[in-house]
Each structure stands twice: as structure tokens, then as C-alpha cells.
Amino acid sequence: MALVGAKSKAFLLVLSAAIATLATMQASGQSILNGYWAPLFDEDQIERIPGPDQGEYAGLPITDAARSVAQTWDPEVLTLPWLQCRPHPSLYGIRGVGVLHIWEDLDPQTLRQIEIHTWIQVWEAQRDIWMDGRPHPPPWAAHTWSGFSVGHWYGDVLEVHTDNYKRGWVRRNGLPTNDRTVFDEHFFVNDDILTHIMEITDPEYLTEPLIKSTEYQRSPNTALPPYPCRNVTEIPRREGMIPMHMPNQTAVEQVWAVRNSVPIRAAMGGADTMLPEYQDAMTKFPVNPALSSVEKLEAQQDAQK
């Protein structure tokens, strides 16, 4: 009887440990992240809704190559029918407008997480975060807007690493990302607030990782309606005509800085513009030209297209 009792106690201990492990696995995904989350815009509403102007690059660690690409960008390019329903890459889309829906898939026998899904309302952009340790796609695998994401739990914090992106953008004013960009994220919850911290590393267009944070509030009674998108002809154009600025149209980047009394050099961005002491450096910059002269130069350069 004593032997049976000892075995029973050992079995109960193992069972208790297994139940505790399963409860922990369930709590990590299901009870913490699952649900609908409404984005909060109290920190960066202008950045994320109307969007930044061309030439507004201050506070971003961009390279000269990124600045050169952004200078040729024309917002009218978004009116092209074949670009109107193009989704944001997930490294930008996670900060997009619309509700964020998170849910998980569990192994029906072990209850281990297989994957976590995120779904952003705008463009119905879905991403799969694989939690089962599956191998990475081979180098020749197709790159996508969502990339390939793998996640791990560290306590109640979900860490996600994503690569295999298409070339995309890091800001909605032409600043690009290349197809070697990697994206690291941390998700954690405090009461009804979900905090998302992101780090973008781009060897071509960023001189150092770019870090941003976003917050969401739990929205339990939310539904996620469809997001229909249809291509239409907004502006009639000749076939093959692509809106863009030519490399010599430098004035297009200067208008925002001059209009907002920001030194043109500071508006061009770079890692040093992220630091508080950069305010002292700006006092030594040359005075901006008059707005009327910059607008006149812009009109002349537009006419030379």
C-alpha cells in the first residue's frame, strides 16, 4: 500500500506540473493577447493618420541612399490603380489605422501554440507568427509583404523576429526599406493596454536600428468588418506614365522645412537628429531661404520634368 501511495503521489505531482505547464502556455497566448485591440493615437496621431510631408525626415537614422530614394517619391503615385490595394508591409502595417485582431492556433492534443495570427483592419493584412520552431524558408523563397515571423515567449512578453520582406517603406513619405530588412518586436499587456515595441534593422537605408512604440486598448465588443478594395482610375494618365520627382528637383524636399521654420539640414534626418543636443547644433546652421523663393524654384523644377 505504501508503494501504491508513493506512486500515486508521484503521479499527482507529475499531473500537477503538467497542468501548471499547460495553464502557463494557455495564459501566455490566449488570456493575454487574444482579442481585439483598438489603436491609440495620443502620441503620434499626425504621423500615423494624415501622414508626414515629403522632406520631413528629422529624428530618423536614415542613410544618404534612403534620402535619395525618398526625394524622387511623389504622393500621386498612390493613385495608380495597381498600387491602390497594395498592403503595408507588416513592419509598417502594425502601426496602421484600424483594429488589431490577435488569435492563436493550438495543437488539439498538447495545447501547445502552433502559431499566433495578427489581422489589421486596413487592407485585411494578416500575418502568421510561427511558435512551433519550424525551419526558416530557404534563401530562394519568395519574399512577401508580411515576411516570415517566428515568436517566443519570455514570461508574459512575446518576442517576434521577422525577415523575408519585399522592398517596402519605413515612413509614408517615400522613405524605403530594402529586402534584407529584419524586424524585431515585443508585445506585452498591462491591464487593458497592449504595448508593441518594434525595432527595424536595414543595412542599406538605416545607419542604426529604428525603434518605435505603439499602444492599443482592449476592445471586447468589436467586430472586424470586411475591407473591400477596388482599383479605380482616379486621375486619367497616358499608359506607362508614373508620377515621380526627378533627382534634380531638390526644392520639393525643402518646402516643408521652410514652411515650418525648421533648418533644411535638420529636416533631412540622420542619426544625430535623434539626440537632444542636436538643438545646439541647429543654432549654427544657415538661415533658410524665403518660402516664396523655394516655392518658385519648385515650380521651375517641376516645369523641367
Image (cartoon, helix red, strand yellow):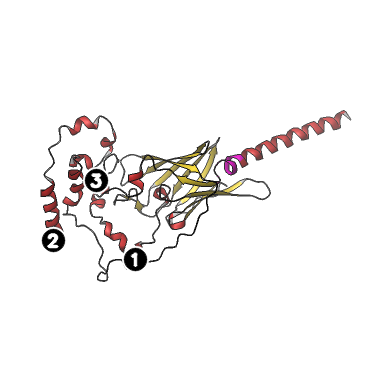
Residue at the right extreme of this rendering: 1
Q: CA distance from mark 1 to mark 3?
A: 30 Å
Residue at the front extreme of this rendering: 221
Question: Does dot 2 land on a helix, a strand or a loop?
Answer: helix
Question: Does dot 3 land on a helix, a strand or a loop?
Answer: helix
Start and end of the magenta stretch?
27-34
Q: CA distance from mark 2 to mark 1?
A: 25 Å
Name the residue beneath numbered marker 2. 303
Q: Quadrant of the C terminus?
A: bottom left
Viewer-proximal residue among 189 and 137: 189
Question: Does dot 1 land on a helix, a strand or a loop?
Answer: helix
Quadrant of res 263: top left
Left or right of 73 on screen, residue 227: right
Residue 99 location in percent, x, y? Answer: 47, 50
Name the residue beneath numbered marker 3. 64
Type of amino acid at the residue the image marks with label 3: Asp
Q: Which mark is residue 81?
A: 1
Q: Are marks 2 and 3 in contact (CB under 8 Å)?
A: no
Left or right of 147 on screen, residue 7: right
Residue at the bottom extreme of this rendering: 239
Main SS, magenta residues: helix
Q: Quadrant of the N terminus?
A: top right
Left or right of 224 on screen, residue 11: right
Type of amino acid at the residue the image marks with label 1: Pro
